[in-house]
Image (tube, rainbow, N blue to C red):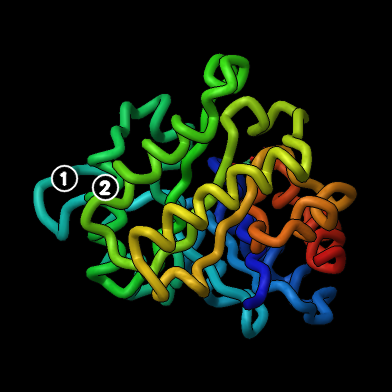
Amino acid sequence: MHNLLALNWKMNKTPTEARAWAQELGEKLEGGAAELAVLAPAVALSALAANLPAGVAFGGQDVSAHESGAYTGEVSAAMLKDLGATYVIVGHSERREYHGETDAVVAAKAKQAQANGLIPIVCVGEGLAVREQGEQVAYTLAQLNGSLAGVGPEVVIAYEPVWAIGTGKTATAEDAEELAAAIREALLTRYGSDADDLRVLYGGSVKPDNIASICAKPNVNGALVGGASLKVPDVLGMSDAL
Ligand code: PEP
């Protein structure tokens, strides 16, 4: 199974900047063992689709839980699919925190994505208080189970401890492996042999100089990267390290 390097631009880059980034990537990317996927703001996806080098996937950072209709401001899974998207992030901690997304909403979004042929990247992970109480496994698995209710096995899971996102505090490779192994076991229980090929990513202040040790762990199959996804040289550094 190839590692997946999923690049979450968050609310950064205009379509013009996205085009320049994609063209720079095309000039410098020499291929590698990792699969690359760019998760960009919805308005930048057309520019990306037209300029990304062959073999680099793209997708959205969120999707509506509804198929279509009177949901002003939302982007549907069918719209993302029509642009050629492969993936969509659902349940990022910033969506859970700032937009009140519950596990049930995240599961509804993941189902909607799958119904339209997209692969949801379902994010889970504990905050600092939970970590300090040593409850990270129970908390994260409860969140995982809620977020996968009714969701089929065509998923990617991203374990992202909230205290490590955008803070410069990276979980140790052992911390990442502890949760990735627990998540994999839960996926095997849920999906049986369909879970054998599922990828579990780590996310939280991943950079070129720490990605290799984290992704060397047996249950970690790549990374979801925010800050270090914005500059092409950093992306190449991470891709080369995998
Ligand atoms: C993220 O956005 O999912 C993330 C992990 O961000 P950062 O790499 O900046 O911590």
Q: Is residue 71 above or below residue 93?
A: below
Q: Is residue 126 above or below residue 205?
A: above
Element assignment for label 2: loop
Query: Can residue 145 be seen?
Result: yes
Q: Quadrant of ligand 1?
A: top right
Q: Residue at x 27, y 49 (%)?
A: 107
Tell me how many marks there are.
2
CB atoms of marks 2 and 1 within 8 Å: yes
Instruction: Give whichever of 235, 128 is nearer the camera.
Output: 128
Could you tell me the amino acid type at mark 1?
Tyr
Q: Residue furthest left?
A: 70
Asked which quadrant contains residue 30, the reply is bottom right
Q: Position of residue 79 (x, y in %)?
A: 29, 66
- Give the residue number, with chain letter if any, for mark 1: 71
- Split into 4 quadrants, where in the image is the C terminus? bottom right
Q: What label does residue 74 carry, if any?
A: 2
